[in-house]
Amino acid sequence: MAIVKLQRPKLNFGEKIYFGALIKGFFLTMSHAIKTLRGKSVGAESLASSGLGITMQFPEQRWDEHMPEYYRGAPALVTDEQGRERCVSCQLCEFICPPKAIKITPSEIPSDDPWAKVEKRPLEFDIDMIRCIYCGMCEEVCPEQAIYLRKDYLITGLKRADMVHDKKKLYEIGGTRVGLVNKWNELK
Amino acid sequence: MPEIIFQIAIIVTKIVILTFVVVLPLVPLSVYFERRFSAIIQDRVGPNRVGIPLTLLGFKKDFHFFGLIQPIADGLKLFLKEDFTPNHVRKAFYWMAPALTVVPALITVCVVPFGSPISIFGHSEKLVIADLDIGPLFIFSVASLSVYGITLAGWSSNSKFPFIGGVRSTAQMISYEIALGLSIIPVLMYYGDLNLSTIVQQQADHGWLLLPLWKNGHLGLPDLNTALFWFPAAIAFLIFTISIFAETNRMPFDLPECETELVGGYHTEYSSMKFAMFFMGEYAAMVIGSALIITLFLGGWSIGFGLDAWVSKLHIGNIYFGGLIHMGCFLTKLLAFILFFILVRWTVPRFRYDQLMKLGWVVFFEAALINVFLAALIVAAPQLKSVIITSGAVLLVIVTAAVIWVAKVSEDTAKVLRA
């Protein structure tokens, strides 16, 4: 094996006396400090930061506008344009969910309901947001396109019970999703 | 008898106000500045949240004050932490050490002049706790006691890292104390006085040591002798400032507590308020160090440019309040210098230990010694014949060359080891 002998670099007088480098360092650090004080630090524009460094200061500044199209936030149930809940409680999402966060209690739609033809809907639909890993498998597996990952990311609660999203909360987050599935539309 | 009581009351008031109202709050303030300044240097935000939580009381908005209350929150946290004493420590010294680092730093406050005398109803009072005639010597003798705190902390912790930290700090502080003491001899020769109040008064009248641009209240270029003395003064300032950095264990010289090598250094085994006292001692030493540098080299409380006499005469009725303006000026300078300390900490990388020792013993010790002779020559020049001045200058050049040559020769080149 070859032995590589490394020579220490020869320093000239200016480098040995060290002060030049110190003053250069002062200029560097002060330029960063002054840029930050003027709100023009690194990433102030490109990363839409607060200008005090690259940090975005959270409660005042949010990254909502900067969120990518494909962002996976909280999973939520959606209704279609007629206000019908799309979920038919097939429980595929419950079975695919890797952390077992989803719990569905299925029930039948009574025969006098205008959507009696759909036959099933969930009586209860709970997603435990402590368990959820935002993987999006429920969205992928849903045959009715009833569950979607929305862009909500501020899922907080003071106790464990707060973190379980029930059916009402899920529809509140999800809202209406227009188009795509018209399978149960009477007119078609 | 009432006269004595009056005197004692004044002294106690001065101690309480100058130490606990002026200097002690500077310690958390410099901690805050340290964190914010380092943050903006490194493109971060730093602590900017802790303020008055008005929302807890039902108001709409909190007051943040740029996070200025953060040090108080930190202090409160340290108070509430468990004060854990490990089983293997030497208890008495372990308990004594934190106090030994804080107390000397705070004692030295007493000779620092904070402003020109304030006069109320004909009674004039100097803004200094003890107007000693041995100012800098007193500061050196007391401040060097704080090495005991660090050393005892390292030794009494009875574990490896604190011990190494303590030993390092002892060696470092003793080495740099020599350069520290020698470097201000030119300054003391120039003033011919050891009383810090007099030194500052002289600077107010005849220009700061590093900025001699006015004389007796008139702007103007200094005479030849003063101008020449600027060079030894600048060298003394440089050596003194860097030695103060070493003395306060600040960044380029913070080997006693380098986190990368020694966990926390001498205070590894300390927790809660005992740790906080080391922390406070370090920052108090920094405050006092900068106060001393300002007092000796940068005009102390003097506003400069010949304005001081005018400021001293400001009065409402019988109350001459110019001293308070001077005190504000002093504190402004102090804060600026503390910011400089912080800038240095976040700019200059730490020295290796042998480099540190070499800098102290080979460079600064010799440079300070030569500087003493140079200053003596310049100070004495007006009284001497030109032959003596010339021979002195030649001698000085020869001695300097010899010292540089010895330093160069003694610099051992690494020998190639052969197995």
Image: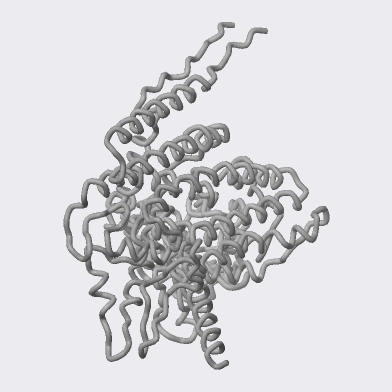
Q: Residue at x 39, y 33 (%)?
A: A18
Check the image and report above or below for B205 versus B373.
below
- Please, is residue B286 above or below residue B372 in the view? below
> Residue lying farthest right?
B87
The answer to whether residue B301 is left or right of residue A72 is left
Is residue B45 in sight in this rendering? no
In the figure, residue B117 lies in which quadrant? bottom left
Residue B29 in the image, given as x and y percentages of width and height: 46, 66
Residue at the spot x=76%, y=52% of the render?
A: B156
Total tally of numbered discs in the picture: 0
Q: Nearer the viewer, residue B210 or A117?
A: B210
Q: Position of residue B220 (x, y in %)?
A: 16, 56
Q: Is residue B95 above or below residue B51?
A: above
Which quadrant would the C terminus of chain A be assigned to in this image? bottom left
In which quadrant is the N terminus of chain A drawn? Answer: top right
Give x and y (percent) for residue A60.
37, 67
What residue is shown at x 41% (from left), y 29% (from top)? B400
Q: Is residue B369 left or right of residue A95?
A: left
Residue at 27 percent of width and 88 percent of height: B316
Name of the residue lying farthest toward the bottom: B2
Q: Quadrant of residue A62?
A: bottom left
Question: Which residue is more in the foreground, B355 or A82?
Answer: B355
Residue B279 spot, x, y in % from top left: 58, 59
| Residue B399 at least partly seen | yes
Q: How is the image coloured?
A: one colour
Residue B155 located left or right of residue B327 = right
Residue sitting nearer the eye, B10 or B52: B10
